[in-house]
Image (spheres, helix red, strand yellow):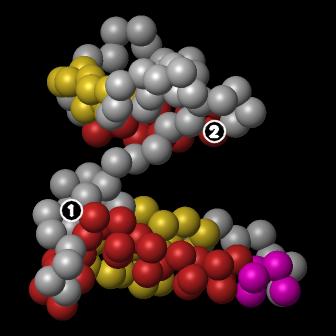
């Protein structure tokens, strides 16, 4: 990924035991600073087709908030294709926050707060 080999880690955990069908189970890695996390997530695209992947681990309420923005993101992507424009569309969950944001061309289009999801549902907990 072109990262410094001395990236400091807080903790590394395997999410399950190795099995015959899954000899290398996923790892959960906690990094010291958010700059390294963002860099690893950005460079993770280079792993496509290698059998490896990098994902951000979010608590269930933030996963739900991000999931609620996916249809809006898909609609924005379809609109950009229809109008044949080159738009930058992304969903971002800032570090140490409780919300997810949909950005279109660098401008905040929609924000969903995970706290609202927790308060409106008895099923989702931190």
x then y, percent, for residue 100? 35, 70
Span shown in magenta: 78-82
Location of residue 29 (image quadrant): top left
* Secondary structure at numbered mark 1: loop
Q: Nearer the viewer, residue 98 or 29?
A: 29
Q: Residue at the location (27% across, 26% down)?
A: 13
Residue marked by disc 2: 45
> Which quarter of the picture shows residue 84?
bottom right
**Is residue 50 depicted above or below 93 in this figure?**
above
Q: Is residue 116 left or right of residue 63?
A: left
The earlier-in-sequence mark between 1 and 2 is: 2
Q: Nearer the viewer, residue 26 or 101?
A: 26
Identify the residue shown where x is 32% and y is 81%: 112
Residue nearer the viewer, 104 or 1:
1
| Coordinates of residue 5 in the picture (x, y in percent) | 42, 9
Q: What is the x, y in percent for residue 83?
A: 83, 86
Secondary structure mostly seen in magenta is helix
Badge 2 marks a residue whose secondary structure is helix
User: Label 1: which residue?
Assistant: 97
**Distance between the Cα atoms at labels 1 and 2?**
24 Å
């Amino acid at each position: 990924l072109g990262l410094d080999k001395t990236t400091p880690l807080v903790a590394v955990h395997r999410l399950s035991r190795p099995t015959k069908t899954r000899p290398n189970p996923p790892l959960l890695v906690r990094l010291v600073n958010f700059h390294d996390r963002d860099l690893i997530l950005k460079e993770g695209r280079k792993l496509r087709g290698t059998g490896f992947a990098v994902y951000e681990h979010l608590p269930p309420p933030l996963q739900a908030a991000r999931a609620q923005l996916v249809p809006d993101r898909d609609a924005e992507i379809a609109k950009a294709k229809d109008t044949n424009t080159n738009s930058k569309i992304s969903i971002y969950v800032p570090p140490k926050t409780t919300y997810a944001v949909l950005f279109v061309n660098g401008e905040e289009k929609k924000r969903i707060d995970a706290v609202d999801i927790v308060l409106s549902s008895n099923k989702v907990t931190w």
